[in-house]
């Protein structure tokens, strides 16, 4: 009987599965038909949409943009760079020009129509078009001149007509906007072009200071005013700032004397020596009021008459002192060299960190909880590359001014043979109600200032390296229960039984 019931249910399920299968097949067939008859033709149609011009960017020799009030010509060099050839002859902004060529080659025609009368061109802004584009390829082939008219009444489109084609084409309004450029927009805005790897000398001169740094086989060094150690990263940051200067405006062949722009004498002059002979020099002058209450600053290279206007804050960025370029490493110990660090504290418990098996750091003081080995390792890593924030003083006469006559913390690092690698003194003082921190290596001549958080990394007690256990929660005392069964009433119960 059970077998009969099971057999009946199987037949019923099979009967129900047939319509479901048919439904699924119907849905799949419908989806396939939609893709085949709708999506694929649409994709083919999109792929076959005509573009306004067909050419290869690399093959273009000249690009001419004609506007009602001006004409701009550009030419591509053999190296693939662009130059403005009219109305002035200067380097062009390669990115801007290449973006325009990309727009010309990719812009699609959304619709085409034929005007009834040629005189109707004025209705479309094509009798005197706002923009006319002409391309000549490197083999001498001139592509059809393209005139861009005015916008359509609706639809954010623009009318375009190609030379030799009576039809009008519609493209996006953004197409015309992208081709409407001024000379300033098309000019290269790099103020001081140079190759960073070729820089062998950097000189900074103001009315108050003169700094000269030179690159040698051993790295960067001071040539003037003294042979201090140099922070190579500070040099790279400064060169990066020079590379990033961009002009916001230009003054061509100024008729005024350079003193009118604060350039004779200049407020600051930066000179770069490139290789053996080549040099680049940039002079920084006065501020000039700009739009919306902002200010700009005059700049001039030594190899041309053009003046550049850049952001006013540039003078501050380029005005560096000797201390800005000095190496501020208090100590620098190779990784893995330290085997032991002895920490002595002013009026506090000292301790010793030692590198144990598998380079796991240990401390000679025990405390309640779990040892924070990662914190021990970070302590040693911070010491190995301890850097100051600023140069406080060279050859100090009175160490007590910096809390170093009796240091708050003394750190002694040794290697596995017991040879001393470095000894560092850390001090703290209060100056004008502000706590300040300093560092000085033993045998050194320079006191460095430390940021507060750096000093706090070394201002540790042994127990700071232990993770305290969580306090155990105390159970709550049960509340007394009143009633005939409490302990106070039990004797009465016994008496009643007697």
Image (spheres, helix red, strand yellow):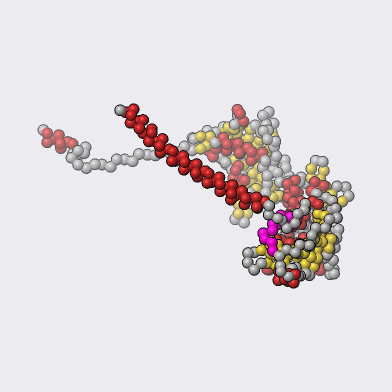
Nearest the eye: 108 or 391: 108
Where is residue 335 shown, x and y percent of the image?
Answer: 68, 35
Residue 164 in view (yes/no): yes
Q: Which residue is outermost to the right?
A: 277
Q: Which residue is outermost to the left?
A: 498
Task: Tell me which segment is drawn in magenta.
Answer: 104-113
Nearest the eye: 47 or 36: 36
Q: Quadrant of residue 89?
A: bottom right
Residue 269, compared with residue 68, is above or below; it is above
Residue 399 in view (yes/no): no
Instruction: Say which quadrant the N terminus sits in.
Output: top left
Where is residue 58 shown, x and y percent of the image?
Answer: 79, 51
Where is residue 399 shown, x and y percent of the image?
Answer: 68, 47
Nearest the eye: 254 or 134: 134
User: Residue at horizontal 85%, vertical 69%?
Assistant: 255
User: Residue at horizontal 59%, vertical 47%?
Assistant: 36
Residue 449, compared with residue 127, is above or below; it is above
User: Residue at horizontal 70%, vertical 71%?
Assistant: 123
User: Residue at horizontal 60%, vertical 43%?
Assistant: 457
Q: Quadrant of residue 270?
A: bottom right
Magenta span has 313?
no
Nearest the eye: 189 or 150: 150
Where is residue 28 shown, x and y percent of the image?
Answer: 52, 43
């Amino acid at each position: 009987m059970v077998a009969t019931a099971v057999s009946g249910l199987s037949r019923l399920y099979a009967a129900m599965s047939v319509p479901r299968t048919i439904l699924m097949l119907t849905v799949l067939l419908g989806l396939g038909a939609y893709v085949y008859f709708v999506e694929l033709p649409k994709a083919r149609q999109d792929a076959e949409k005509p573009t306004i011009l067909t050419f290869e960017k690399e093959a273009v020799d000249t690009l001419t943009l004609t506007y009602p009030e001006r004409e701009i010509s550009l030419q591509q060099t053999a190296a693939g760079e662009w130059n403005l050839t009219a109305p002035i002859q200067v380097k062009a902004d390669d990115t801007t020009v290449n973006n325009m060529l990309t727009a010309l080659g990719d812009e699609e025609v959304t619709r085409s129509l034929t005007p009834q009368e040629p005189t109707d061109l004025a209705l479309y802004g094509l009798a005197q078009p706002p923009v006319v584009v002409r391309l000549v390829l490197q083999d001498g082939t001139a592509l059809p001149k393209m005139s861009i008219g005015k916008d359509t009444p609706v639809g954010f489109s623009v009318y375009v007509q190609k030379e030799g084609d009576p039809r009008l084409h519609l493209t996006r309004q953004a197409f015309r906007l992208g081709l409407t450029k001024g000379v300033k927009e098309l000019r290269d805005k790099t103020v001081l072009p140079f190759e960073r790897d070729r820089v062998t000398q950097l000189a900074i001169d103001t009315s108050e200071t003169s700094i000269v740094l030179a690159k040698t086989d051993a790295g960067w060094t001071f040539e003037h005013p003294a042979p201090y150690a140099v922070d190579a990263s500070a040099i790279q940051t400064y060169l990066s700032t020079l590379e990033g200067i961009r002009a916001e405006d230009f003054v061509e062949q100024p008729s005024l004397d350079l003193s009118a722009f604060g350039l004779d004498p200049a407020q600051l002059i930066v000179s770069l020596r490139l290789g053996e002979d080549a040099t680049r020099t940039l002079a920084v002058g006065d501020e000039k009021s700009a739009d919306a209450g902002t200010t700009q600053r005059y700049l001039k290279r030594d190899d041309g008459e053009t003046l550049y206007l850049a952001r006013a804050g540039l003078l501050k960025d380029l005005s560096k002192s000797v201390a800005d370029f000095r190496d501020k490493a208090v100590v620098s110990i190779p990784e893995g060299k330290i085997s032991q660090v002895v920490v002595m504290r002013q009026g506090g418990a000292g301790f010793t960190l030692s590198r144990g098996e598998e380079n796991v750091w240990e401390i000679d003081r025990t405390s309640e909880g779990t040892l924070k080995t990662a914190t021990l390792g970070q302590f040693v890593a911070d010491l190995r590359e301890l850097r100051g924030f600023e140069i406080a003083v060279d050859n100090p006469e009175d160490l007590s001014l910096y809390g170093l006559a009796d240091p708050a913390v003394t750190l002694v690092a040794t290697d596995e043979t017991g040879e001393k690698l470095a000894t560092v003194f850390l001090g703290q003082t209060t100056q004008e109600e502000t706590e300040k921190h300093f560092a000085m290596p033993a045998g050194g001549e320079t006191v460095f200032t430390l940021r507060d958080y750096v000093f706090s990394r070394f201002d540790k007690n042994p127990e700071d390296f232990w993770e305290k256990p969580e306090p155990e929660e105390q159970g709550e005392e049960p509340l007394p229960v009143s009633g005939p069964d409490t302990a106070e009433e039990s004797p009465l119960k016994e008496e009643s039984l007697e």
